């Protein structure tokens, strides 16, 4: 298995992640220089789930992003379309519910979750807009959405350095530690092709979410978007979405 194409065919992307599953978390830690764990902590804070609540963690992979919720007594469902990832996660954390599912056709009932979150996975979905609509469907009225995704550095100089790292250094480093370095060429290309912060915020609002806001982390390498489902459970407003609220571009705490 080589890398998936930017057409993001579900079978190609799932097979690619199946192949890299055993070392996926290790490679991510190395390539992000340890930042991944800090970014995920910010996501958990933004989700703000409490014991007794139910959280859907999409693109959960091996369940690394789901563990903080389970450890806090929150009922978390780790959902991913890569069976290889799910198997690795289930072996490590048999106490977490791992469910195979496609983000564009979620296998859950309407109004099921207090919060829905997806970290570094929306970019890999073939139809992100449909996925955002599905997340809205399964969230309870008033429920929270938190999306963490690679984004566009806010400073031009930093943006240039980051782009050079993505296209040159990242595949080279991955070649030394990953069983499928070509998959990280896909990673770099998919990040470059992804919408910037304001564009993604507009897409979230267009899917029907309200109170859309985002926070830049690590100078905009990553942005954490937040939103709420209307209490009425209504559909997307046909008017132009409001300007998204922003927070600073400092590194994650």
Image: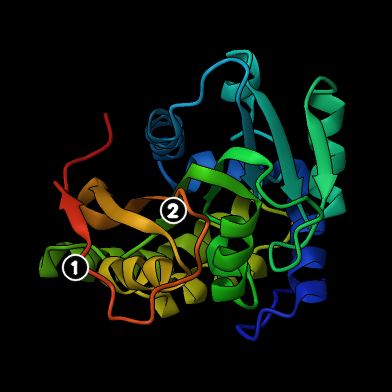
* Percent coordinates x, y for residue 168 in the rendering: 42, 70
Viewport quadrant of the C terminus: top left
**Identity of the residue drawn at 38% across and 82% down:** 238
- Please, is residue 130 above or below residue 253 in the view? below
* Percent coordinates x, y for residue 155 in the rendering: 12, 63
Examine the image and state in which quarter residue 149 appears.
Answer: bottom left
Query: Which dot marks residue 10?
Result: none
**Identity of the residue drawn at 36% across and 52% down:** 225
* Percent coordinates x, y for residue 145 in the rendering: 47, 48
Q: Residue furthest bottom?
A: 7
* Percent coordinates x, y for residue 248 in the rendering: 14, 46
- In the visual, does 30 lie left or right of 70? left
- In the visual, does 83 lie left or right of 125? right
Q: Which residue is mark 2?
A: 230
As helix, strand or loop, the secondary structure at mark 1 comes to loop
**Identity of the residue drawn at 58% across and 67% down:** 133
As helix, strand or loop, the secondary structure at mark 2 comes to loop
N-terminal of the pair, mark 1 or mark 2, is: 2
Instruction: Tell me the mark number nearer the camera, choosing from 1 and 2.
Output: 2
> So how many labels did they put on this image?
2
- Please, is residue 92 above or below residue 199 in the view? above
- In the visual, does 237 lie left or right of 207? left
Q: Which residue is mark 1?
A: 243
Q: Nearer the viewer, residue 40 or 165?
A: 40
- Please, is residue 164 above or below residue 147 in the view? below
Viewport quadrant of the N terminus: bottom right
Q: Nearer the viewer, residue 100 or 145?
A: 145
Residue 46 visible? The answer is: yes
């Amino acid at each position: 298995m080589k890398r998936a194409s930017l057409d993001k065919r579900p079978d190609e992307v799932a097979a690619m992640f199946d192949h890299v599953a055993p070392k996926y978390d290790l490679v991510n830690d190395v390539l992000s220089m340890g930042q991944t764990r800090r970014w995920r902590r910010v996501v958990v804070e933004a989700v703000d789930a409490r014991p007794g609540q139910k959280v859907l963690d999409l693109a959960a992979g091996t369940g690394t992003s789901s563990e903080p919720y389970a450890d806090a007594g929150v009922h978390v469902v780790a959902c991913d379309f890569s069976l290889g990832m799910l198997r690795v996660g289930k072996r490590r954390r048999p106490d977490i519910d791992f469910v195979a599912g496609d983000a564009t056709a979620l296998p859950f009932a309407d109004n099921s979750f207090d919060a829905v979150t997806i970290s570094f996975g929306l970019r890999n979905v073939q139809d992100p807009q449909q996925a955002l609509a599905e997340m809205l469907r399964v969230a309870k009225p008033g429920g929270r959405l938190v999306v963490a995704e690679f984004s566009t550095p806010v400073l031009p100089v930093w943006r240039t350095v980051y782009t050079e790292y993505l296209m040159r250094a990242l595949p080279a480093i991955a070649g030394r530690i990953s069983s499928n370095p070509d998959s990280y060429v896909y990673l770099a290309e998919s990040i470059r092709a992804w919408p910037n912060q304001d564009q993604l915020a507009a897409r979230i609002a267009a899917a029907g979410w309200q109170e859309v806001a985002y926070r830049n982390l690590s100078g905009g390498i990553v942005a954490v978007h937040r939103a709420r489902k209307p209490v009425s459970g209504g559909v997307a407003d046909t008017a132009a979405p409001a300007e998204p609220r922003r927070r600073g571009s400092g590194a994650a705490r």
